[in-house]
Amino acid sequence: MTAEEWPPLPESIQTPRLLLRPFRLDDADDIYAYASDPEWGRFLAHEQPYERRHAEAFLAERVLAKWRKNPAWAFEQEGRVVGGLSLWLARRNRRAEIGYELARWLWGRGLASEAAATVIDEAFRRLPIRKVTATASAGNVRSTRLLERLGMQREALLRQHWVHRGESLDEVRYGLLREEWQPPSGAAPDERGAPA
């Protein structure tokens, strides 16, 4: 299978507590509700103060993006968007990078882990990738712990790697190889050795 022949990932995925589905233009109010919280964006490269126009620009970009290259799911819970997750597919290197965000009022409940684990499972099942990677600010302990719960290994510390709000921050890089991935129990392997 060539990189161009990779199948698309599903647009709609149901987890125990979330519906993962494509972002829509009418999600702007929900995104603004959580992204305008300064503490939420403390380690993210989002504009601050975050205004509704930033949510609209983000959604326009998501809606226009090519699904096969950069799928991105909104986290819908009880009819409203409370976060999201993206995969950047590096087909030539058979790698995917994951990024996620969740409304602060839902932190600590395992929702981002639930969504990320589900998408990683889908990516390893359906795509011929060798590795899933992620980056986080070294000071973002919640995010680094989440990546470790997903089974990712810390691979690098990049010192003073990016400037955020005038401060030089360290960045950590994590990776999960296909052979390290633990599929959900009961999943049968397919011909590539990945769960079907």
Image (tube, helix red, strand yellow):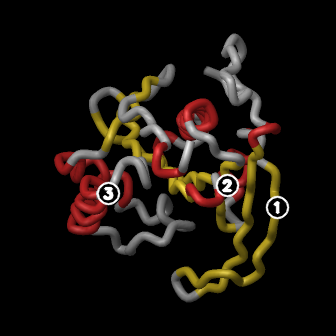
Q: Position of residue 72 (x, y in %)?
A: 41, 48
In what quadrant of the picture does the C terminus appear? top right
Q: Gap in Å between the C-alphas at discs 3 and 1?
A: 29 Å
Name the outermost residue toward the bottom: 166
Along the line of sight, which residue is nearer the eye, 69 or 48?
Answer: 69
Contact, CB < 8 Å: mark 3 with mark 1? no
Q: Position of residue 183 (x, y in %)?
A: 71, 25
| Classed neighbour count for the residue bearing mark 2: other residues with Cα under 10 Å, few (<14), some (14–19), many (≥20) | many
Along the line of sight, which residue is nearer the eye, 192 or 152?
Answer: 192
Task: Looking at the image, tell me whether mark 1 or mark 2 is earlier in sequence order.
Answer: 2
Determine whether 86 is above or below 173 in the image.
above
Task: Looking at the image, tell me whether mark 3 or mark 2 is earlier in sequence order.
Answer: 3
- Determine whether the residue tagged by mark 1 lies in a helix, strand or loop: strand
| Classed neighbour count for the residue bearing mark 1: other residues with Cα under 10 Å, few (<14), some (14–19), many (≥20) | few
| Classed neighbour count for the residue bearing mark 3: other residues with Cα under 10 Å, few (<14), some (14–19), many (≥20) | few
Along the line of sight, which residue is nearer the eye, 105 or 88?
Answer: 88
Label 2, on which residue? 133
- Discs 3/1, front: 3
Contact, CB < 8 Å: mark 3 with mark 2? no
Label 3, on which residue? 65
Instruction: Look at label 2 and name its amino acid.
Output: Thr
Residue 157, quarter of picture: bottom right
In what quadrant of the picture does the N terminus appear? top right
Label 1, on which residue? 155
- Determine whether the residue tagged by mark 2 lies in a helix, strand or loop: strand
